[in-house]
Amino acid sequence: MIREFLKAYPYMELAVVGQLLFFAVFLSVIFWIFRKGSSQFYNKMSHIPLMEEDN
């Protein structure tokens, strides 16, 4: 049933491009998160909820 649907699906190229675009964005986010030097930023951001506010 799925094969029959995919044979008649007129936008197969669009589906492949969409899948490749999603994969590229996913990998970009992973590389952005684990880039060199980002651990300092994330360590600093992780302490924000523990800081006392000056009122």
Image (tube, rainbow, N blue to C red):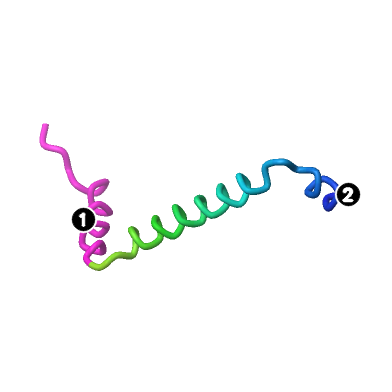
* Location of residue 46 (image quadrant): bottom left
Main SS of the magenta segment? helix
Quadrant containing the C terminus is top left
Residue at far left of view: 54
User: Which mark, by number, is residue 22?
Assistant: none
Q: Position of residue 4 (x, y in %)?
A: 86, 48
**At x 39% / y 57%, what residue is drawn?**
28
- Amino acid type, mark 1: Lys
Closer mark to the observer between disc 1 and disc 2? 2
Q: Position of residue 33 (x, y in %)?
A: 34, 59
Left or right relative to 25: residue 11: right
**At x 16% / y 38%, what residue is drawn?**
53
Question: Is residue 33 rendered magenta in the image?
Answer: no
Q: Which residues are magenta?
A: 37-55
Residue at far top of view: 55
- Amino acid type, mark 2: Met
| Residue holding disc 1 | 44
**At x 39% / y 55%, what residue is drawn?**
29
Q: Nearer the viewer, residue 16 or 42?
A: 16
Mark 2 residue crowding within 10 angstroms, few (<14) / some (14–19) / many (20+) = few
User: Which mark, by number, is residue 1?
Assistant: 2
Mark 1 residue crowding within 10 angstroms, few (<14) / some (14–19) / many (20+) = few
Helix, strand or loop at label 2? It is: loop
Q: Position of residue 6 (x, y in %)?
A: 78, 48
Residue at far bottom of view: 36
Picture layout, residue 55 above or below residue 14: above
Helix, strand or loop at label 1? It is: helix
Q: Earlier in the sequence, mark 1 or mark 2?
A: 2
**At x 82% / y 45%, what residue is drawn?**
5
